Image (tube, rainbow, N blue to C red):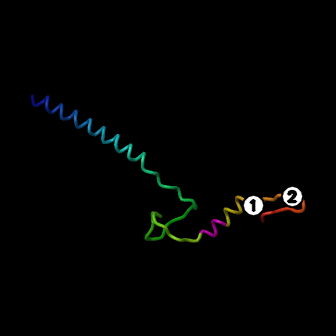
Amino acid sequence: MKQAIFEEQKKKEAELKEKAKEILQMQEASVPQKVEKRVEGAQGSVWNTGNYFWEEKSVTKWAEERIKEVLGGFSHSFPGGEIKVT
């Protein structure tokens, strides 16, 4: 009799663990994943190491490089002139 009760309890524990796993997986799936940092190599300050809070910082160097990358060498001719990005 004790063995049957023990086996039943083990079975219930296994079912509960499986349900807990499923719930955890559903919760993880519903939580938005951490957003990739848009500026490569960006880091928060000492107090904001995870970059979780709004923090003003200069991105001028990155912006200049990105503009050159995206628009560098762009030119367009039209009647009466030409546009070049240098």
Location of residue 82 with respect to 7 vertically, above or below: below
Q: Where is residue 11 in the image (x, y as percent from the top left)?
A: 22, 33
On the image, the x and y values in percent for residue 82 come to 85, 62
Q: Is residue 11 left or right of residue 20?
A: left
Q: Mark 2 points at which residue?
A: 78
Which residue does the image show at 78% across and 63% down from the upper left?
Answer: 85
| Count of numbered badges drawn on the protein | 2
What's the residue type where badge 2 is placed?
A: Phe
Does 60 appear in magenta? yes
Q: Going 13% across and 30% down the picture, which residue do you hit?
A: 3
- The magenta segment is 59-63
- For the stretch drawn in magenta, the main secondary structure is helix
Please give the residue where the numbered disc 1 appears in the rendered image.
72
In x, y percent, where is residue 35? 50, 55
Q: Earlier in the sequence, mark 2 or mark 1?
A: 1
Residue type indicated by callout 1 = Gly
Q: Vertical placement of 82 versus 17: above or below?
A: below
